[in-house]
Image (cartoon, grey):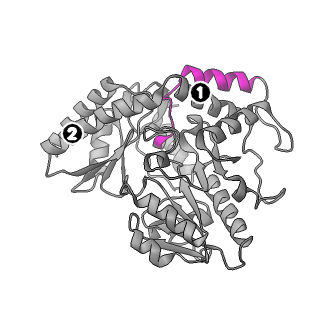
Amino acid sequence: MNKQDVFAIDKAHYMPVFARYPMVISHGEGAYVTDTDGNRYLDFFAGIAVNALGHAHPNLVKAVAEQAAKVIHCSNLYYTEVQAQLIEKLASLSGLDKVFLANSGAEANEGALKLARKYGKTIADDKYEIITANHCFHGRTLMTLTATAQPKYQAGYEPLPQGFTYIDYNDIAALEAAISDKTCAVVLEPIQGEGGVNVPNDDYLQKVRALCDKHGALLIFDEVQTGIGRTGKMFAYEHFGVKPDIVTLAKGLAGGVPIGAFLATDKVASAFHPGDHGSTFGGNPLACAASKAVLDTILEDKLLDNVNEVGAYLMDAIRSLGEKYPTIIRSVRGKGFMVGIELTREGREIVQACLDAKLIINCTAGNVLRLVPSLTIGKQQVDEMITILDAVLAKQ
């Protein structure tokens, strides 16, 4: 089947919800993917921050193959050893107590919102309001779409669930004006991803924590994109010295195998009882084995050190490009391997030009180039990426 056949089948049968690029990926290895025409690309997008170990990492491949030969799925009415091992590790790493395993970031956030509402009801019947931040992104289910304070994603799905309030991110006065004793939860990304890689002030999340404590509201961190080493720490909230009541995870958690999770303190998790939440596929043995392999590899191979060292090298290199092209690059921000390059113009043409030059990056928020490579890349790949991006920007 050639790529034109693939395009034709997709046009005929796939729902038209993706603006795809005209390439068919065949396979990958490390930081590179190859298409069906034999072109090899340097991947600095990693499946939207998913391929934490890169492509076809031997530890992940082995874990999936070995688990698939044992049992791929069983009902959550029964226990599995691999699930127990995974949730114990997640609890230990996060400092939280209870874990629920799902299949995606949207499911993780949906579950976290349900838990927050259920917990709020144990305090007062009218404690159900949820505060989120403008330009956030929390998922595609109806409730997480409502939590996503971006009208472009919500249009056409009205009426939306009630009880949500939106504030400006990194504006503590706005939160202070909005929060009340009716607020059951404040939901924030420690660093906004889809909104443009927006990093808060150093003390912002600490002040949010204090306001939540004052009003008896839960603090939920959506770490679907920032978690699992992406920013140089296992969880981005560790940069800010703040511990949430609930944290949500997905994307890099199993290196490409679908999984999601939300974690909570014992106190909050106690609001759930048998039958209050569930999932047929969530926490299946295959996904758990993959996730355990990813976490073990991050820890044993000291990949957080790599993210910090190479991430600093990457940031310096990007800032040098900013000095070279001040009329194109407005600012550079991020942490670790989560970097945003804010442009003075729309970014889609630059993304396409990079793709033509065999570099995969992404543009979000209209004019922010987003770099979220695998946690395994080295300085050689950074140099290769900078060479390509430099050449592309020189032609703008």
Q: Which residue is mark 2?
A: 392
Q: Which residue ends up furthest to the right in the rendered image?
A: 77
Amino acid residing under circle 1: Asp
Reply yes or no: does residue 53 show up in magenta. Answer: yes
Instruction: State whether residue 282 is above or below residue 208.
Output: above
Residue depicted at 58% across the width and 45% down the height? 250
Residue 232 x %, y %: 43, 37
Magenta run includes residue 237: no
User: Marks 2 and 1: in contact by CB < 8 Å?
Assistant: no
285 or 167, nearer to the observer: 167
Please tell me which residue lies in front, 365 or 122.
122
Query: What residue is shown with label 1?
Result: 296
Q: Residues within 10 Å of mark 2 (few under 14, many from 20)?
A: some
Q: Residue at x 39, y 38 (%)?
A: 337
Can the viewer see residue 301 in this picture?
A: yes
Residue that appears at 70% across and 39% down: 87
Q: Is residue 339 visible?
A: no
**Residue in the foreground of this view, choosing between 275 and 93:** 93
Residue range of the region highlighted in magenta in the rendering: 49-69
Between residue 250 and residue 232, name the one nearer to us. Answer: 232
Q: What element does badge 1 sit on?
A: helix
How many residues crowd around disc 1 within 10 Å: few (fewer than 14), some, or many (20 or more)?
Answer: some
Residue 312 coordinates in the image, percent (x, y): 31, 35
| Mark 1 → mark 2, Cα distance in angstroms | 38 Å
Q: Earlier in the sequence, mark 1 or mark 2?
A: 1
Q: Position of residue 285 (x, y in %)?
A: 74, 34
